[in-house]
Image (spheres, grey):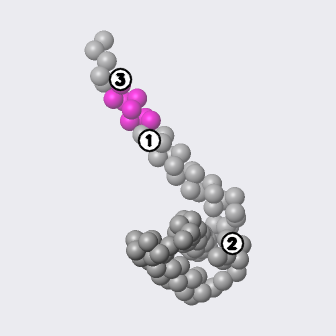
């Protein structure tokens, strides 16, 4: 199928059409695999990766639209940082909860 750069040039409707056709292809590949008619099982993995690429591009656009509404300038580095930043802050809150538990469990 297409690389992510090619997918980014498509409109949302075209991406959704590509997603639907990729899902249909994956269904057909699974059916062929189950009946023993699939010669190259690597096609299933490639199709799943294509579906993931399409979902990634759609999610990037969703984040860019939300940032535009919030007045934040979207940037490729900002998109990666936003997803990593939430994971870091979630980890930080879990870490401080762990410290609190350790302090209250100390008998001295």
Q: Label 1's element?
A: helix
Give the CA separation, mark 2 to mark 1.
Answer: 37 Å
Q: Label 2's element?
A: loop
Classify mark 3: residues with Cα within 10 Å, few (<14), some (14-19) or many (20+).
Answer: few
* In the displayed structure image, the side of residue 17 where residue 100 appears, left or right: left
Q: Which callout, 3 or 2, points at the residue further toward the start of the chain?
A: 2
Which residue sits at x=29%, y=22%? Answer: 105
Of residue 29 and residue 100, the one placed in the foreground of this image is 29
The mark lying in front, picked from 2 and 1, is 2
* In the displayed structure image, the side of residue 96 where residue 5 appears, left or right: right
Q: Which residue is mark 3?
A: 103
Which residue sits at x=63%, y=54%? Answer: 81
Q: Which residue is mark 2?
A: 3
Q: Which residues are magenta?
A: 95-102
The mark lying in front, picked from 3 and 2, is 2
Classify mark 2: residues with Cα within 10 Å, few (<14), some (14-19) or many (20+).
Answer: few
Task: Return the x and y of residue 24 as percentages of the image width and height.
Answer: 47, 82
What mark, if any, has residue 77 been given in the picture?
A: none
State the predominant SS element of the stretch in magenta: helix
Q: Which residue is mark 1?
A: 93
Taking the image as drawn, is residue 60 in sight?
A: yes
Classify mark 1: residues with Cα within 10 Å, few (<14), some (14-19) or many (20+).
Answer: few
Task: Return the x and y of residue 25 as percentages of the image width and height.
Answer: 51, 80
Task: Return the x and y of residue 1 as percentages of the image width and height.
Answer: 64, 76
Q: Are marks 3 and 1 in contact (CB under 8 Å)?
A: no
Q: Which callout, 3 or 1, points at the residue further toward the start of the chain?
A: 1
Does 12 appear in magenta?
no
Q: Is residue 103 above or below residue 18?
A: above
Q: Label 3's element?
A: helix
Which residue sits at x=64%, y=66%? Answer: 72
């Amino acid at each position: 199928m297409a690389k992510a750069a090619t997918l980014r040039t498509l409109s949302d409707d075209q991406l959704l059409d590509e997603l639907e056709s990729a899902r249909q292809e994956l269904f057909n590949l699974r059916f062929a695999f189950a009946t023993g008619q699939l010669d190259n099982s690597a096609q299933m993995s490639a199709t799943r990766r294509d579906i993931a690429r399409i979902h990634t591009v759609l999610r990037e656009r969703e984040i860019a639209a939300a940032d535009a509404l919030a007045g934040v300038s979207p940037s490729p580095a900002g998109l990666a940082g936003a997803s990593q930043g939430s994971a870091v802050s979630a980890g930080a809150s879990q870490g401080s909860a762990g410290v609190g538990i350790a302090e209250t469990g100390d008998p001295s």
